[in-house]
Image (tube, grey):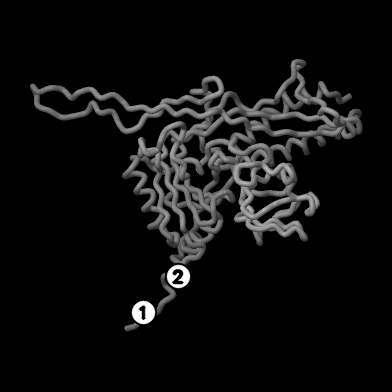
Amino acid sequence: MVSLTSASNALKNVYLGVVANQLNTNANPLLGKIEQSTSDVWGKQIIKLAPYGINGGIGAGTETGSLPVAAENQYVQFVTDLKNLYGKISISDKAMRASANNAGAFVNLLNAEMEGLVKASSFNFGRMLYGDGSGLLATVASYTSSTGAIKVDSVRNLIEGMVIDFYDESTKDNTSSGFRIKYVDRANNTFYLDAVAANLTIDTGYTIYVQNSKDLEITGLGAIFGSATTLYGLTKANYPWLTPYTNSTTKEISDATIQAGLDSLEEIAGTQANFITCSRDVRKAYQTYLSYFKRNIDVMDLAGGYKAITYNGLPIYADRFVKSDEMYLLNTDEFTLHQLCDWKWLEGDDGKVIKQNANEATYSATLVKYADLICNKPNAQGKISGISSTVTNPFSSTIEA
């Protein structure tokens, strides 16, 4: 007979390892390229010594002259707080009792909940990798109360089922928060909530975040390439190498554009990119560019079952969370996801992970991870923006005699 004890044991001993592996390697192809480590975690913070430049004790001289003066490696201290990442499942008491005498039915129930948890966690973790830590999903462009349509600047970070909060500048609007997304109209950058439109007070300029997550997400690429004056507790102006390579000139995608960015990374940081990610619009434009020159489009298999086209042996993966006109040139060897521990279930004093929710005939279990992302060498990373979604056919014009 299925009980809360047996269900808790199943979550800890059967599901945890599988779920942790899926979230660590299969959630996003970029995450699959990043090392995960428990090193440099001190209490609730990550404190890491990051080397920059090279050892200065090098030189040439005469046979009897002085030896080079020793000049040790240079280091700075990165400091960031561990971010609290949660995933929660809920099962009703009615569903538990209905399957209590049918182990197969209960397994199917748990499988469905765990698959949903993995899907939601993968979506949000992938989104955070490209975010700036603020958790900003979108900004309201307009709200039509008669239809409930909320038009935003972009829906790439939104998905059905997500529970969101609305903020007026930096203040949460509690009358319009904690609602769930019912439908996303991706063609028109519009979405709808499962709440009655008349009960909402949403204005143009409101910002949208995942429930209770504002300014609490991991330090993603948006922070590294963002306009903030500090990174990992350091002032960027005092350490120019904290600023990555960027090319924001409006342009069409081409081999020359990509190679110029790769060359700059090698010249500035002495590093080589090993992973390229871009929007689907940019990937489509690059495929069109290749077709004009009658070149084959090579495909590469990535960890987690993902596929990517290539440039000179480098994978180019199209990720939904990249802005429509952008491409990142990354050296993933310089990234580490520092964590207090791997994914774990929150346990009570009795060792159970499934607990009854207060005043409800439901039970829940919460998956947790305390971690943050650090890039050891920001100037080894690059971003090309302003890329057109179309490409001019270089052979379309007629050459006159």
Give the vertical position of 343 relative to 251 (above or below).
above
Quadrant housing the N terminus: top right
Q: Which residue is mark 1?
A: 399
Tell me how many marks there are: 2
Q: Residue at x 38, y 57 (%)?
A: 256
Q: What type is the residue that disc 1 sits on?
A: Ile
Label 2 CA crowd tier, 10 Å (few <14, some 14–19, many 20+): few
Q: Would residue 274 be found to the left or right of residue 205 on screen?
A: left
Q: Residue at x 56, y 56 (%)?
A: 280
On the image, the x and y values in percent for residue 260 come to 36, 53
Q: Would residue 58 be found to the left or right of residue 93 on screen?
A: left
Residue 294 disc label: none
Which SS class for mark 2? Answer: loop
Q: Nearer the viewer, residue 353 or 166?
A: 166
Q: What type is the residue that disc 2 sits on?
A: Asn
Instruction: Report which quarter residue 380 is drawn in.
Output: top left
Label 2 or label 1, whichever comes before in sequence order? 2
Spatial CA span between label 2 and label 1: 14 Å
Residue 393 disc label: 2
Asked if residue 277 can be seen in this view, the reply is: yes
